[in-house]
Structures are given as structure tokens and as C-alpha cells.
Image: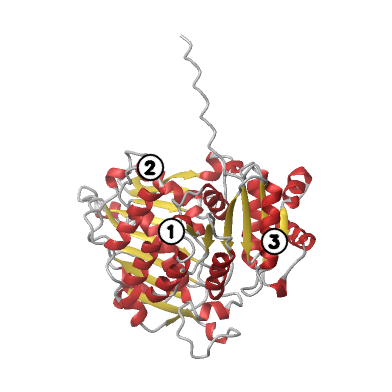
Amino acid sequence: MTQPAQPAPAPEPGPADHVVVLFGATGDLARRKLLPGLFHLAKAGLMPRRYRIVGSAPAAEALSDQEFRAHARQAVEEFGRSRPEGPAWQEFESALSFGAADPQAPEPLVAAVRAAEEAVGGTPRRLFHLAVPPVAFTSMVELLGATGLAQDARVIVEKPFGTDLASARALNGTIHSVFDESRVFRIDHFLGKEAVDNILALRFANGLFEPLWNREHISHVQIDVPEQIDIQGRAHFFEGTGTFRDMIVTHLFQLLGFVAMEPPVVLDAQSLRDEQVKVFRSMRPLEPAHVVRGQYTGYRAEPGVDPASDTETFAAVRVEIDNWRWAGVPFLLRSGKALAEGRHVVTLGLREPVLGMFPLNARATADGRSNELVIDFADPGSITARFLVKEPGPSMRLAEADMVFGYQSSFTADNSLEGYEHLLLEAMLGDQSFFTRSDGIERLWEVSAPLLDAPPPVEPYAPGSWGPDSIGALVAPHRWHLPDQQ
């Protein structure tokens, strides 16, 4: 008997008509990520039906509309996944305009936004993206409030979200004086990656994994984001920030929240972020003795770096979570510059069963690496289950085997969005699920306070290594590793 055809899934609603304003439109982030990302959304049919994009920068860096369009074309040619050509580019290019803005002279920007709204027609939503240095956050937010442009608008705020608890509270206070929290989108591009979002599906949609996702079955969790690059001439930024503030608080703690959260009641922004913040509240304050700070040899000779600098270019942190699911399970976080490889990996180490039935020579190959679940969230991403099997042959010897799911081999890349593209779309839709909440970021700075108040001295490490020698003792009885290293 022929089965009736299943109805096609209803198309997801697209964003309402928008005017998107990019502060810092002439900067590196806009050139590498924002302009190419917006064009890719437009070409994929994911932008609003009617929209305009207004670039902005201080008057000293102002561009004409035509110069901004040429700037956007060059950015898309150099960094985009889609070529700036054909009708798609012509339509996108025609939506671009520019309006300079200084705190004491916002009139060109106000005029450009009003003109863009008239071109769109009706009452389009406004979305402001503050792709500007932290020192400019306050003046730009105050400008939006004073001019009335912030009314009913949303704002995307780039990291860092403060440098300690006091500065985070001050920044949140400034933002909340103009925008209520429901209209604030603190962006972390890690949380826009397909493989990171897939953590939710992996855990909560599969009976194979969720029953194991606790202290009874998992011995430790490792979140590893090493980088091969050095500071690449960014001494001014890095000297005032360091790896702990730049990577651990902003990115790796957010990943920890996703990995460790309890099942949300429903898959919406409030429930997801409530569960993530519960994890942050369960984190013990960081003990300086459970942190290794490193500095690669040669960092102090970088142009603009203090010859006596104590800024860390490497941080390894042992985090403890005091709740029923994770008590006693260490979360081991590591990131740094000038390391052996660039990777983005979450590894869940499962507890070993009793292997007494196997001869000692059969167990030797296990070497503490018997069962792991590995989530590689570097684009395009993969998930690997690692386990022990019997080697072919007459004797009982154990060997490692992998089962791998790869996004690239399983799905067409045409359907994928890069982290910034995904989050720009979610911000236009008003969905805050993958954006950081103010109470969450303040709690992370609160648990970081003991380390910031009394940081251990930096330890040297050679460029191309995995960091200082002392990191092994930090994670004992476990060990640092990346999944493809034997």
C-alpha cells in the first residue's frame, strides 16, 4: 500500500525588514567577517526581503557611498565565500551607504539611517553592530541614546565584555541605560559554529549519549583551542588583555556552559541561557594554584611589548563544577599563541571499565585513552567516538578504533553558515539563544577574581610546543592530548 506523501516542512520565518548599521565598517572585523558574511546571507536568500546596510566610522575615516561599496567589494573578493558578481552582488551593493559618526557630530549617521529607512519603506527594525575597540563602546552607546536611534533597536556588542567584574558591571550599566537586556546581543562567534550548536543535538536528541553525560561515566572534559599564530603585531591589544581574558573567559567558558548544562525545558533563548548561567553559578572560584600561565620565548621582543611583560600568551585552567551532574569531574581548558597546532576540540574522557579479564600485554595499548567522545568544532567540524577493539590475530590484543561523523562528508556545504553569518541572522531574528547574557558574564568575572587578583608568574615555553612543562601536573592523573595524537 502506498504511503501518503509527508507534507514538506513549513519554511522558517525570515527576518523582518531591517536597517543594519556597522560601526567600525572600515575596520578589520568588518572587512574579514561582517561584510562577506552579510553578502553570503543575501546570496543565500536569508536577508530580510527589504534591507539597507549603513557603514559608519569616525569622520576622519569617513567614506562616500561609492567608496564604501568599493571597500565592500574588495572585502568580499578577499575573504568571502561568494564572488561579488552578478545580480546578487548588484542588489547587495545597491543596499550599501555610509554615514560618519563622532560623539559630538552624529548628524551624518542620523541622516544616513533616516535615508535608509525611507528607501526600505514602512517601519524597518534597526540593528547596530558595535565592531569598535572597547574604549569606544560607551561613547557609541551614548550617541545612539542621545540621537534617539536606539529606540526599539537591537545592538550587537563585541568582546571583550569587560576585563574584570567591576568593568563588566560598568559596561553593562552603560548598555542598559540605553538598551534593555532583551535587545542586547553579546556576540561570541564560537557559539555560532555548526559543530558547537550540534552539542545540543548530540546530547539531547540521542538516547545513546545523554545517559552517559555525567560524573558516573565521564572522568574529565578537555576544551582545547591552541593557536599556531603568534600575536601578529597586535601588541597594543594583547598587552592589556592576555590569553585568559581574550580566550578563556570569552570563548572557552561559554563552551563549557554548553557542554555542562542541564536539559532546557524548551529550546528557546531564555531556557538555554538560564541553564548556561546555572553552570556558571556552580563553578568554583578559580584557584591560582590550578592555573598555568605561559609566555612564548620571544614575546617580549615583539614591537610594542614591555621588555618586562608579565602578560600570558598561554593559559591552562582546571575548573571544578559543584553540582549533582559534575561534582568531581575536572574541566581542563587550554589555549595559547605560537603552539604546535591550531585546533578547536572538546574531548569527553569516559571512565574505564575494569579490564582485569584482559592480559596485561593486551591492555598496554589503552594507555589511558580507551574511550573518548571528541567534538571537533573547527569548520566544518566532526564528532569522533573512540573505543577499544580486538586486533585481528590469534592473541587477545586491544587496539583503538574510531567512528567518525564529519559535516563535510555528510551534508552539503551550501547549507552551512559560518559563525558570524549564523549569529548575524539570529540577531536580525531577535533570537538570543547563542548570545551571552549580562548576569552570565558577570558571574564568570566573579569566579575569575581570585586568579586576576593573584596571578601566578608566567612560565616560558618554546614556540611550536604545547606550552610550559608544568601543565602535565595540572591535569594529573589525566593528561593533555589532542585526539589525533597518539
Where 387 falls versus 457 (above or below)? Answer: above
Give the number of the mark in front: 1 or 2.
1
At numbered mark 2, what does the secondary structure look like: helix, strand or loop?
A: loop
Q: Which residue: 28% across, 65% down? A: 320
**Distance of mark 1 from mark 2, alpha carbons?**
59 Å
- Residue 258: percent from left, percent from top: 38, 54
Q: In which quarter of the image is residue 326?
A: bottom left
* Of pointers 1 and 3, the one earlier in the residue sequence: 3
Say which mark, if any, is on residue 482: none
At numbered mark 3, what does the secondary structure look like: helix, strand or loop?
A: helix
At numbered mark 1, what does the secondary structure look like: helix, strand or loop?
A: helix
Residue where numbered disc 2 is placed: 392
Structural crowding at the residue carrying mark 3, measured as other residues with C-alpha within 10 Å and reported as few (<14), some (14–19) or many (≥20)? some
> Given the image, on which type of amino acid does mark 2 rest?
Pro
Structural crowding at the residue carrying mark 1, measured as other residues with C-alpha within 10 Å and reported as few (<14), some (14–19) or many (≥20)? some
Compared across the picture, whether 274 is left or right of 412 comes to: left
Say which mark, if any, is on residue 181: 1
> Given the image, on which type of amino acid does mark 3 rest?
Ala
